[in-house]
Amino acid sequence: MPTPVAEVRSLTVDLPAGADRRHAVEDVTLSVNAGEVLCLVGESGSGKSVTAQAIMGMLPPALRISTGEILVEGAPLPLGNTAEMEAIRGARIAMIFQEPTAALNPIQRVGRQVEEVFTVHRAGAAAGRRENVLSLFAAVRLPDPERIYRAYPHQLSGGQCQRVVIAMALALQPRLLVADEPTTALDVTTQAKILDLINELKVTQDAGIMLITHDFGVVADVGDRIAVMRHGIIVEHGTRAQIFSAPKHEYTRHLLAAVPVASPREHRPSDQLPTALTVDHVSRIYKQRQGFFSHREVKAVDDISLSLQGGRTLGVVGESGSGKSTLARCILRLEPVDGGAIRFAGQEIASATEATMRPLRKEMQVVLQDPYQALNPRQRVGSAVAEGPLIHGEGAAQAAERARHMLELVGLSPQSADRYPHEFSGGQRQRICIARALALEPKLLIADEPVSSLDVSIQAQILELFAALQKKLGFALLFITHDLRVAASLCHEILVMQHGRVVEHRPTGDLFADPREAYTRALLAAAPGKGVDFSKVLAAVTP
């Protein structure tokens, strides 16, 4: 029998009075063995992160452990002793956080931040700490460790920042690594590299790794054992082979069925609506300073052309920095255009004045990535949805009625109009943002990574909602994503971007059947879940 490096025994964490349930985590028992990855899987609110926080001794003050114990290498953790836990965190247990830029100090060089782990724990000679950090950077496959050591977080990519955070967690060779959604905000290619690194670490470090995720695609690539959580309770526990071949619990089957697969949706022929948007050889150039007297030009958007008809969806796919969002801002005229033409609603808008653009703004709307930040927390959602019609001259009573109708259209009750954003889940908030964007009956809707921060089950619902609303309302949809699996489930055509240029632009079915460019093939290969044939899994779990 393998020896556990960590055990959680009958753990129950109480929620404060007035919460929607009594316990954040209820009677949870699990273990993590050396050299294995235990995946803790579930939707937001299932208790995954609370379990991790309890293991790390980092529960919020409002939460309290009422029963249970946590052991590392057979010894109970002194959860009530702050000084002892500070000595254990980093040395015997360590955590990799979801958002690496939030975990790093923006005004301190990253090398010094990793050195701080050795300093706080008085580990090793002070003279050798810099070399230890450089060795860690090399171990996590960071390019040019000397340059990374001197860099500030904003000078690194998201994937590089995540590798720095992993290096920090590995500094004192802990026995247990807790990784809380470490790849959710990353491009699929960067995500694949981080998952490969986690697979490598379990062998080279012989550590136990608890990986928290909502995505069974990620589990397929790295998981050895899986514990599925719902409402604070573990509903199913087994090996990867057991869970993927014969899931027992209905909730597990529900999560597996929601995993996006790189298989294009069949689109029924529809009536061709007029062209809503034409982009003709558009460029956007930034000037980046080099020293005091010189600069270089960076082509964020380089000679892009596309056409989009009403009732059709064009997916714009690429990694961070490929120019996707810059292209969207140019189309919305939130960025100036340095070359080319844009025609929208029959008008040339690339060089249009703000006075010309103002009446057109209602015809082009946007849904952003993060619904938490897109809504004013002090504004009732009905008011948020009605705000656009009010600005464009609609009467108060009519705008309020329109808001209630739009909320109903996106699957929320009309009574939702009287509630505040914090009273809704993340998926419901994104539905509110979609209702707000569609309240003005736009001809063009731009969705910029609208599902990347959502659970896969909620993600599937939002994608179905976009398809249903487009069929009903006939708007053109420009859908921006880094994940070709997501694009496949919604888009009629896909435009692949890299370094500001179009790499490939073809109908979705043709692109997936025969990707012509190496970069497109790399994006497809990087999609999580390559270790499992999800078409067979979905056939087994879907009624």
Image (cartoon, rainbow, N blue to C red):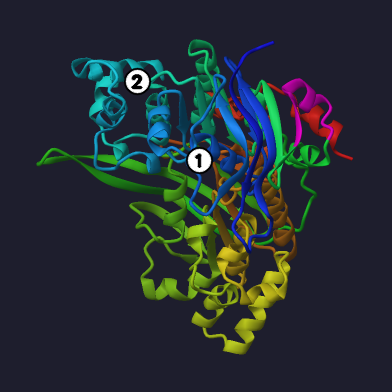
Span highlighted in magenta in the image:
235-248
Numbered disc total: 2
* Vertical side of 102 occupied by 365: above or below: below
What residue is shown at x 37% (from left), y 71% (from top)? 354
Residue type highlighted by circle 1: Ala
Q: Position of residue 375 (x, y in %)?
A: 51, 65
> Residue 160 appears at what percent x and percent y?
39, 30
Residue 210 visible? The answer is yes
Which corner quadrant holds the N terminus?
top right
Of the pair 79 and 541, the residue shown nearer to us: 79
Res. 517 in view: no
Q: Which residue is tagged 2? A: 137
Q: Residues within 10 Å of mark 1 (few under 14, many from 20)?
A: some
Instruction: Choose between 301 and 529: the one closer to the eye.
Output: 529
Q: Is residue 34 left or right of residue 82?
A: right
The mark found on residue 482 in the picture is: none
When the figure is inspected, residue 1 is found, relative to residue 528, above or below; the finding is: above
Residue 151 to residue 107: above or below: above
**Residue type, numbered disc 2:** Phe
Is 492 on the left-hand or right-hand side of 447? right
The residue tagged with tag 2: helix, strand or loop? helix
Residue under label 1, please give it: 185
Q: Where's the C terminus, which quadrant?
A: top right
> Residue 105 falls in which quadrant of the image?
top left
**In the displayed structure, does residue 513 sit left or right of residue 278?**
right
